[in-house]
Amino acid sequence: MVVSLPEPTLSAEELDAEVAALHDQKVLRCSISRSELRAINHKIVLQCLEWYNSKHPGNEYEPAPGVVTRRSEFNESLLWTHGNFVARPKRSGCFSFLPAPRTLFFFELLDRYDVDEVITCTPLDEPVTEGYIFHGFRLGWGTRRDGRCDCVCKTCYRQFHVPHMDLKRTCACGDSKVEGLCKMCYLSCDVLHPAGGGFVFGHKKESFAYC
């Protein structure tokens, strides 16, 4: 009688190395041109706004000229992405030809087996100051605030901005129990996040597992 031996079980270190290798392969596949990157970003914006508009009938938004910012990170073989894009409210009637004020959005995507799922998409109370002409070509970088040093107080849950990472992080309430607003993006990229933890991944330790 032939007895088949069980497949060897990978250790935690080997699993981590395997996930890292998959990540490296995906990064290599993502070495694309600027035009392809713009197309991918535009697709993400359309997908996020379709999700948002379906939940807010009568208050729909459409894409507007502006930079799309993204940051991605693997967690338990799932690829999470946080980012920002610019949109404006849809207008109708005799003034529909006039462009509406632009709004900065935060979005959160979960990549399951190469299928992106929108988890969060919400407008932010942040000014959009990038300079654009009518056709959408950039005139200047503007003064959009950087989100890399956004913090939240663990006592009063107030969100605030630390102008320099070397300064002592103390909230206005006097408490020094302060942490980065997003454990995924803090000090790593300039993605701006919603206040009050309006996102899933990176807000709390227990939220890292998502089924």
Image (cartoon, rainbow, N blue to C red):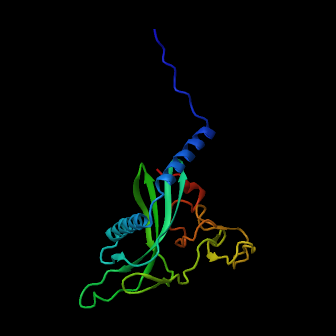
Please give the name of the residue rendered at 72% of the width and 75% of the height, measured from the top-left corner: 170
In this rendering, would 102 be left or right of 94? right
In this rendering, would 61 be left or right of 139? left
Along the line of sight, the residue nearer the viewer: 116 or 54:
116
Above-or-below relation of 168 to 16:
below
Q: Find residue 35 and report its image quarter.
A: bottom left
Above-or-below relation of 207 to 106:
above
Please give the name of the residue rendered at 50% of the width and 64% of the height, measured from the top-left corner: 82
Looking at the picture, how far across and down is residue 181, in whole percent? Answer: 60, 68
Which quadrant is the N terminus positioned in? top left
Above-or-below relation of 52 to 32:
below
Along the line of sight, the residue nearer the viewer: 51 or 134:
134
Q: Residue furthest top?
A: 1
Looking at the picture, how far across and down is residue 52, in whole percent? Answer: 37, 69
Looking at the picture, how far across and down is residue 71, in whole percent? Answer: 53, 63
Along the line of sight, the residue nearer the viewer: 33 or 208:
33
Looking at the picture, how far across and down is residue 47, in whole percent? Answer: 36, 65
Q: Residue furthest front?
A: 33
In this rendering, would 152 be left or right of 194? right
Along the line of sight, the residue nearer the viewer: 1 or 125:
1
Q: Residue furthest left?
A: 93
Count of marks placed on residues: 0
